Amino acid sequence: MQSRTHTCGELRVANVGDKVKLVGWLENLREVGAELGFVVLRDFYGTTQIVIETEDMMKVVKGINKESTISVEGTVRERSSKNPKQVTGDIEVVPEKIEILGRCRYNELPFEINRSREADETARLKYRYLDLRNPEVKKNIILRSNVIAALRASMIEHDFMEITTPILTVSSPEGARDYLVPARKHPGKFYALPQAPQQFKQLLMTSGIDRYFQIAPCFRDEDARGDRSPGEFYQLDMEMAFASQEDVFEICEDVLPPIFAKYGLYDRASGAPFARIPYREAMEKYGSDKPDLRIDLTVQDATEVLKDCGFGPFATKAEDGSDTDVRIKAVVVSDFKESRKFIDKTIADVEVQAGNKPYWFRLDENGEIVGGIAKFVQDKKDEVIAALGLKSGDLVVISAGKLGQAQKTAGVVVKTFGAAVPGHMDKEQYAFCWIVDFPMYEIGEESGELEFCHNPFSMPSGGMETLLKAERGEIDPLDIMADQYDLVCNGVELSSGAVRNHDPEIMIKAFEMVRLGEEDVKAKFPAMYNAFCYGAPPHAGIAPGVDRMIMLLAGENSIREIIPFPMNKNAQDIMMGAPGEVTEKQLEELHIKTVAEENS
């Protein structure tokens, strides 16, 4: 601390009379007269008031632009008018010397530092170094540092070894676009930035490493959204040899809740064991594989009771008498006291999010069905009340369509009405759950053929025997479950994980189900396939997203608020000017030519 005796968040009444030297940014000058003024000095740790009491000292500070860095040498005294909202509010410093360390050369700032979160996001990202001076913005970066340190310490305490895996690797089909890096010494060939350390961590298991982890950078050329940053993100990557699903669950249930309870907005977090919900049950009961268990609303199937009510969108029979694939889902919101205007607005919000219109009716205090599509339900009133377990005051919100569409819309209803209607959401907690028993395969929307549903490296439940039964036609491939699991907290997917398919024969058979043979597997995943042929241990792992975790802990709606230098929605770093152009010489060295895009 050679340049200062104390920080700006450190001085107290006990320091009264001390000679001190403080350094920091000149946040503000409030002039009371020609000889009296108050300077707020800010550093990483807090703020301290500097009181100006001479004309000469006032001339000095008036000549300094706000956000210049300065040093202040003076004496601590007790304030006559104390500020209980400020930790240093009982004292002030009377300066004897003020020196400019780094002058701010601009009279006007792009935004007021302490109100930077109100500024346009483009300005915030362009001047991120100023944005981070705002204590409210900076605290998220401090939180990030503390959480990562706590995660690292806990993993080491659980006997995991931290190992960093390569950043330059080979392009691999893992579900997202790769970032490619041209290889100067190998014309026409490219490295890829890793979408995840998936293959490397499995190779570590075959190498004899028992428990691995790292705070891993991952790179995916994806579009941005509220809980996903384009380009780069970080995850708590872990893998365990000779391990089962239960071993992974035990570690996560021991590591995460204390960190969430300590660092989060809420001091309550689910304890072990977390709720376990099969994927298909989650879709039926919550309309989502990312349920928010803080909400008490659930989904009911209303197909049988409403299919013949005469309302067109609910018709399960076509005009020619053939069956349609319409399914009807209902969400009952009990003790509903909000207005018709509230219903209309919330229904509209659901439609925007789900891309599908929901419908509604109410059971009033007289036991009558009213509002919305009530006229279509009147003839089935008693059946509907019995089937849905309705009571006076209940609101019923209904979705219809193909199964997936009806489920998704009902899921949005649960989250939207659950959060908006008082009494249906216990918000101040972190509610974890595991989603388990994912289907191994699905029918691809574009191909119309069997494809992997989740992670192709997962072990199919039942192993080889299950795959052979499907091959012989004894079971439907769509009924094959995988030893895969998602970790969900407050409706946010934190991570996917799996028990890995470590047997080359089972791996080949699993890929044959999607029309890829042994040669395809060898070509796409040569290192992993070959390593497994040398005796691989059963292993399992998971990789909770660090950015999403910290977003939940900080209570932020945008992931950009917890990343030190985030890109914008278009994957641009407008502060540094990335992506940017390079010189022709650089392109020549990499054996690359750019092609101008033709105007359509």
Image (tube, helix red, strand yellow):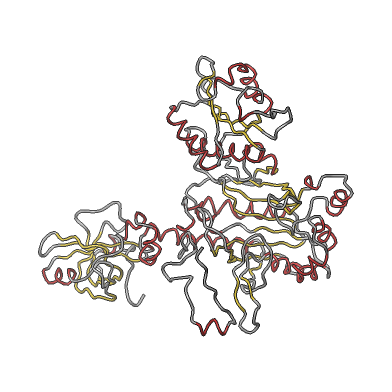
Q: Which residue occupies the extreme front position in the image?
A: 600
Horizontal and vertical percent for residue 532? 80, 67
- Is the N terminus in the top left, top right, bottom left or bottom right quadrant? bottom left
Write the residue at 57% across / 34% down.
Answer: 297
Determine whether, in the image, residue 505 is placed left or right of residue 357. Answer: right
Which corner quadrant of the image does residue 174 belong to? bottom right
Is residue 466 among the parts visible in the rendering?
yes
- 291 vs 236: above or below: above
Q: How many marks?
A: 0
Horizontal and vertical percent for residue 228? 54, 56
Which corner quadrant of the image does residue 185 belong to? bottom right
Write the residue at 21% across / 71% down.
Answer: 64
- 81 vs 573: above or below: above
Horizontal and vertical percent for residue 259? 55, 54
Horizontal and vertical percent for residue 408? 61, 41
Determine whether, in the image, residue 170 is placed left or right of residue 561. Answer: right
Determine whether, in the image, residue 422 is placed left or right of residue 281. Answer: left
Determine whether, in the image, residue 522 is placed left or right of residue 403. Answer: right
